[in-house]
Image (spheres, grey):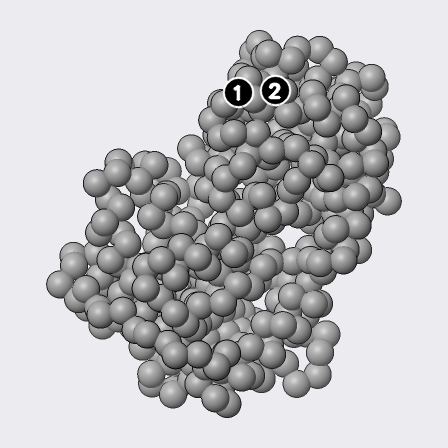
């Protein structure tokens, strides 16, 4: 089976979506009978070995942290049709998703969407609550025209069901548990970074974005003070002068990231809009307890047996949650976190399930026997981008 992914969520500082696609490519390369193509925007056109990678030149978004937003659909339709895949997966809800559907119609192959980003909450956070209704209509229109939609968590599946979408199933992401492991702990890392040996070292890895609520982390650390120390891993991180912290720029090599995570004492994450929380699962695989918030998909990964949850946007509650982890046994909590991820979230099991669903979709036109309803398209809505406009 030949799988093709297309997404604009691909850039020099990309996070979970990029790691998911790279893991899928590696899985396909290791299994006979599977091929993978990837079509993503880049700084210049590139074509490598057959079926491996095609990037098309797209200008970078201003202030877009390296992301690129294609405006014309036809070149992307042509690229997918040229690759002749058996299934196309659209990894973002923008122009390339419409290109994927047009290519799927031309090839008469299924097109699935992966609901990586909670577009309704993301736009409301940035532009105000007035965007919720039109964005919901857009999501209904877009994903209602796809053959199937994967959601990375149960809560995202329920939100799509709440919009009237029925061709949806939960497909959690996975973790390379051989890469992210406590065995990569390096006690000399603290010396190299100038971090005190006796510090309680907390780590945040990800983007500096409004929905990640870094200000909550900083306020919580101000309340706690010594001996807590914060390691920030990512591009364009703030550097609060009144906090004990260390910044490591974006790490593209997963082995280095895995080593940094394993060398800390706990992972903290105040983001309240996670559709899965891949870095949380990676931190757990590295043997870290996690302090997160009781929102989004985080409670599907974290509970008191592997860390602690606080109410969203509450620095005092977050500080108390951090202290509660260290008042118990953080090493034991981290071991339990590692055991949970190994048992449930290894990439091979995730992709075996996905491929089973895709084979069923190709042969039967649906993934599970059910009466499925389509949402009436809101074709008059201005946010709807038809493929050949």
Residue 172 at least partly seen: yes
Tell me what residue is drawn at x 66 percent, y 85 percent.
Answer: 33
Tell me what residue is drawn at x 23 percent, y 49 percent.
Answer: 133
Image mark for residue 315: 1
Number of marks drawn:
2
Image mark for residue 189: none
Q: Residue furthest bottom?
A: 363
Q: Residue furthest front?
A: 371
Distance Cα–Cα, label 1 vs label 2: 6 Å
In the image shown, does 83 or 217 lie closer to the viewer? Answer: 217
Tell me what residue is drawn at x 79 percent, y 50 percent.
Answer: 339
* Percent of width and height locating residue 368: 50, 78
* Percent of width and height locating residue 307: 70, 35
* Percent of width and height locating residue 349: 70, 67
The quadrant where residue 7 appears? bottom left
Q: Is residue 27 above or below residue 227?
A: below
Residue identified by numbered label 2 = 319
Q: Is residue 374 left or right of residue 335?
A: left
Q: Secondary structure at mark 1?
A: helix
Q: Is residue 147 left or right of residue 297?
A: left
Residue 193 at least partly seen: no
Q: Is residue 185 above or below residue 167?
A: above
Q: Dot 2, how many residues are within 10 Å of its Cα: few (below 14), some (14-19), or many (20+)?
A: many
Q: Is residue 110 left or right of residue 13?
A: left
CB under 8 Å between discs 1 and 2: yes
In the image shown, does 108 or 256 lie closer to the viewer? Answer: 108
Q: Secondary structure at mark 2?
A: helix
Tell me what residue is drawn at x 62 percent, y 67 percent.
Answer: 24
Q: Dot 1, how many residues are within 10 Å of its Cα: few (below 14), some (14-19), or many (20+)?
A: many
Name the quarter where the C terminus is drawn. bottom left
């Amino acid at each position: 089976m030949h799988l093709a992914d297309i997404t604009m969520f691909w850039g020099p500082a990309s996070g979970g979506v990029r790691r998911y696609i790279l893991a899928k490519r590696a899985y396909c390369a290791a299994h006979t009978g599977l091929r993978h193509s990837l079509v993503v925007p880049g700084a210049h056109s590139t074509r490598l070995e057959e079926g491996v990678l095609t990037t098309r030149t797209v200008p970078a978004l201003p202030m877009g942290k390296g992301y690129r937003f294609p405006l014309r659909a036809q070149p992307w339709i042509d690229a997918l049709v040229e690759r002749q895949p058996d299934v196309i997966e659209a990894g973002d809800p923008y122009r390339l998703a419409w290109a994927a559907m047009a290519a799927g119609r031309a090839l008469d192959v299924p097109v699935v969407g992966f609901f990586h980003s909670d577009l309704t909450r993301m736009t409301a956070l940035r532009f105000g609550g007035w965007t919720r209704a039109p964005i919901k209509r857009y999501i209904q229109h877009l994903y209602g025209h796809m053959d199937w939609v994967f959601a990375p968590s149960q809560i995202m599946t329920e939100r799509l069901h709440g919009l009237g979408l029925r061709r949806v199933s939960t497909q959690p992401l996975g973790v390379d548990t051989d890469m992210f492991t406590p065995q990569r702990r390096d006690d000399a890392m603290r010396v190299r970074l100038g971090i005190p040996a006796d510090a309680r070292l907390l780590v945040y890895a990800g983007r500096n974005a409004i929905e990640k609520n870094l200000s909550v982390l900083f306020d919580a650390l101000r309340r706690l003070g010594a001996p807590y120390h914060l390691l920030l891993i990512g591009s364009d991180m703030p550097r609060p002068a009144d906090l004990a912290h260390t910044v490591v720029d974006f790490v593209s090599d997963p082995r280095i990231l895995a080593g940094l995570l394993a060398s800390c004492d706990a992972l903290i994450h105040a983001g309240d809009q996670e559709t899965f929380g891949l870095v949380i699962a990676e931190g757990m695989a590295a043997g870290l307890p996690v302090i997160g918030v009781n929102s989004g998909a985080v409670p599907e990964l974290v509970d008191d047996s592997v860390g602690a949850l606080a109410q969203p946007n509450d620095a005092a509650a977050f500080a108390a949650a951090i202290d509660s982890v260290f008042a118990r046994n953080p090493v034991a909590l981290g071991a339990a976190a590692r055991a949970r991820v190994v048992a449930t979230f290894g990439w091979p099991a995730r992709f075996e399930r996905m491929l089973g669903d895709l084979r069923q979709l190709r042969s039967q036109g649906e993934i599970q026997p059910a009466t499925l309803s389509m949402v009436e398209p809101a074709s008059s809505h201005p946010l709807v981008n038809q493929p050949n406009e």
